[in-house]
Image (spheres, rainbow, N blue to C red):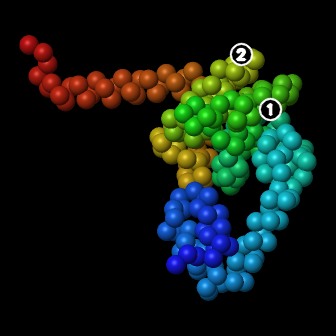
Amino acid sequence: MKAPAPLEALTAALRRLPGVGAKSAQRFAYHLLQRDREGAARLAQALADAAARVRHCARCNTFTELEVCETCSSPRRDASLLCVVETPADQLTIEQTLSYRGMYFVLMGRLSPLDGVGPKQIGLDRLLARAADPALREVILATNFTQEGEATAHYIGEMMRARGLKVTRLARGVPVGSELEYVDPSTIAQALRDRRAVSEAVAGDRTDRSGARADHEGREDPGGSR
């Protein structure tokens, strides 16, 4: 038996959500139609409203209903600091720490050449234009501590340093391989306070990796070569 076309379309649409496979999408679709028609209608209306009204901020690229978001238009923010994050969810997480009062730029992604995501796809041209602000003194790289996030931070850091800007990276209080959205605010607040210059952060990473290799080799050959 074949499902009605509208039900198949709903299931296919739900599969576009991250982490939702065919079975989960089917279960969600049947639940909404079988037990929560009112919820289905509200969900449809909310999605339609968001798609129609939410846009990108002209300055920082985050989500907003305005041409320029409230953060960018606030006179209370420190224009000398620019924090670069991957997603609006990361921006919100940093805001919840209540420890940062600078500006933001939201990449809406991270460099991933294998997936076809290059500098153009994450708006680095807009970031460079943002970095031309004469009030800007420091760029804080707050991309995630994943391989792609680290590569993105390195790429942006090189561009910003070439323009004479101070470039810092979140301290390693944030676990390696983690995404900011899932890190508790107090840990992020401490990482912001302890941020380091990118050159220092890279050197520290190399030292950590070299120490780990030496320790591993020592365990493999505890008596040394004879």
Q: Is residue 10 above or below residue 52?
A: below
Please report the residue visible at 80 percent of the width from the left and 59 percent of the height from the top: 51
- In the image, farthest residue toward the front: 1
Q: Nearer the viewer, mark 1 or mark 2?
A: 1
Q: With 125 as the anchor, is 36 left or right in this view?
A: left
Residue 211 or residue 60, whichever sits in front: 60
Few, some or many C-alpha atoms within 10 Å of disc 1 (few <14, some 14-19, many ≥20)? some
Q: Is residue 151 above or below residue 66?
A: above
Identify which amino acid the numbered label 1 is placed on: Arg
Q: Mark 1 and mark 2: span between their CA atoms?
A: 16 Å
Labelled disc at residue 48 = none
In x, y percent, where is residue 149? 57, 36
Residue that mark 2 sits on: 162
Identify which amino acid the numbered label 2 is placed on: Ala
Q: Is residue 37 above or below residue 83?
A: below
**Corner quadrant of residue 126:** top right
In x, y percent, where is residue 65? 87, 56
Mark 1 lies on a secondary structure that is helix
Screen quadrant of the C terminus:
top left
- In the image, farthest residue toward the left: 226
Residue that mark 1 sits on: 126
